[in-house]
Amino acid sequence: MPAPVITIENLSKRYILGQQRSKKDGMRHAIEDAMRAPLAWFRSDRGTKKQKSEFWALKDVSFQIKQGEVVGLIGRNGAGKSTLLKILSRITVPTKGRIRINGRVASLLEVGTGFHQELTGRENIFLNGAILGMTRVEIIRKFDEIVAFSEIEEFLDTPVKRYSSGMYVRLAFAVAAHLEPEILIVDEVLAVGDAAFQKKCLGKMGSFAQSGKTVLFVSHNMEAVRSLCQRGIWLKDGQLHADGSADTIIQSYFNSISTDLSFSDSSVVHGLEIQKVSLKNNRGEEASQYRPGDSLTVEISYQANDRLEKPYITLGVQGINGSCFTANMLLDGHQPGFLEGIGKIACRFESIPLLPQNYTVKMAIREKSGQTMIVNYQDVAYFSVVGDLAEFGFKGDYLARAIRSTAVVVPYEWRLPDGTTARVAMRPLAD
Amino acid sequence: MDELIIEAGRTERQYWRDLWRYRELFYFLAWRDLLIRYKQTVVGVAWSLIRPLLTMIVLTVVFGKLGKMPSGGIPYPLLVFSGMLPWQFFAAALTESGNSLVTNSNLISKVYFPRLVITISSVITSFADFVISSVFLTILMIWYRQVPPAAVVFLPLFVLLSFGASLGVGLWISALMVEYRDFRFIVPFMVQFGLYISPVGFLTSVVPEQYRLLYALNPMVGVIDGFRWCLLGGQQSVYWPGLAVSTVGVVILVVTGLWYFRRTEQTFADVI
């Protein structure tokens, strides 16, 4: 029976909202307080008398992770995943509860933390390594390995500001990959980089897991979680919602989110409030289940408190293997003249050539220059495609395996040596 | 194997061990700051000489020539530069370390290491300029054929004192800056103001006797007096009660600075 390496007991984290922005809480106020009660200022209970709205990012979370376990942490945005990782990485402290950790921890909450644009690749390897906790001797020892892994030998003495984003990420991950901790904590690192690089990262993490190390992994890429982790932990609203085998947890996660259609975040940025994002089927009804080849309409209800000129809206459908297709105003240029007041924008995907799987919809809105993102949500809506593929002319022996590797199927036709042709297309079924 | 316990408000014991474990990071951060400082500049490192040189000329003209302040028989440029050496270090350290946490906020919100490393290494970075300037001072002393007195052996103590003053104020300001960006405006003002209220362009002896103890509350007074006593000697006797006050002030600054820094450090990532 392996010993627990991470024991989390009744962990809670409270954030005081508006901690830095509220005018009331500025320095003038602090000085005023200090003048009125010079001694109270030095006591630690300073400020608690003030009424502030608070938010519990984590509430009473307890679980254990054993030596050698590879655990996937899943949940929607704002469920407390990042907060948990931040506490585990000692970036912030818990409000209540405690964690016991046995072993050297390395946490990667971001690729390339501390990289400096002006410094060369070589200089950044040393800097980043030191920031991640490596000693100079260690870095020198692993230097060649890091460079080989990153595949950027020839640009080693070029400032990283001249790197392509792919090179940058490869170099950054290469440093992190050579940390040799006993416990690895990873947050969405794979969200960046090209497919080949992501595969390499997953491979590295896989071999790390196989060597008996403990891994705690957060990702929205469910396929990555599924292939890497044995165990899944699902956080919901700051609480531990479910804990079990990765496959079961991911399945029930998808089942739950696809029934919960309404998008509930209503943060206001640039005066724009996204009130609801709903998915509608051929008949214009809200739905979470589609058949291959159905039409899918994404409808965004917004309230623009300030007039928003020529925003760029991009939608993307993501499968478990990554992006499938997109509707992108940066490409097509069909921006609305402006958004003002309450309104709706819809986008109809005529025929979704998707294999039966679970999908998420991501959405971003940029302001008219196309540079600044006003809104960027990875998962505004969820849906699943269901259906028996045999009905669509798929009858291969390896259907189950093929489904995992790809999601989009455009109509195609085989022309075989004997002169026969075979056409495959996912068309909507007649109702 | 060491067990790490993460709990609300109980990290002290672990902290100092971590600070030791991350000791190389002091060097790496200072090295980074030095490397990038003069990137894409034309004259590069020469900037760390040009600035004090021009300030020296201005102060010599204003206080020495126009103000006709007493120099105690020492060439006025030398008098000014020996005061400016610790002052420039203090001013640079104040500016650099004051902003250090905010400019490194990407590190603070993404990776753990004792945050003291950031602030201390920014003081070390400023110390590099100090070293460059001291070479220039040596040249200046040779030029004026000024032989340092025997008291020069105490110079390291005053360097330490100036380091302490810089660190103490730096700790306070960097930690305060995390929550109150007001200090972004206060610091340049302090630096500008400080140049005139510290005895950089003149000798402390111009300050009326009855105010000298009060004047010594500015920790840089003790430091600058000390530097002059060690380097120029002669009539530059040290006003001992004043030095004592300055030293105690520096110690208090460092201790309270550490206390405040440590107390707020845990919430840096949440507030920054």
Image (cartoon, rainbow, N blue to C red):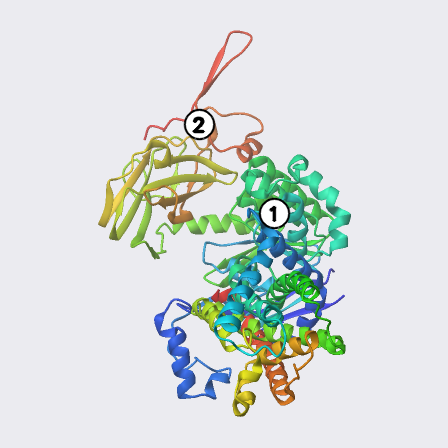
Residue at 73% over, 73% down: B148
Residue A76 on image: x %, y %: 46, 54
Looking at the image, residue A352 sits to the left or right of residue A117; the answer is left
Query: Which residue in the rendered view is the most extreme toward the left?
Result: A341
Checking the image for residue A391, the label placed there is 2
Residue A256 on image: x %, y %: 44, 52
Q: Residues within 10 Å of mark 1 (few under 14, many from 20)?
A: many
Residue A349 on image: x %, y %: 34, 34
Q: Nearer the viewer, residue A214 or A137?
A: A137
Up-down relation of residue A329 to residue A373 (above or below): above
Q: Nearer the viewer, residue A334 or A201?
A: A334
> Which mark is first along the chain, 2 or 1?
1
Up-down relation of residue A207 to residue B202 (above or below): above
Residue A55 on image: x %, y %: 43, 68
Identified by mark 2, the residue type is: Glu
Q: Chain of mark 1?
A: A
Residue at 29% over, 55% down: A271
State how far apart marks 1 and 2 are (Cα): 58 Å
Q: Which residue is mark 1?
A: A119
Q: Nearer the viewer, residue A31 or A132?
A: A31
Mark 2 element type: helix
Looking at the image, residue B98 sits to the left or right of residue B137; the answer is left
Identified by mark 1, the residue type is: Leu
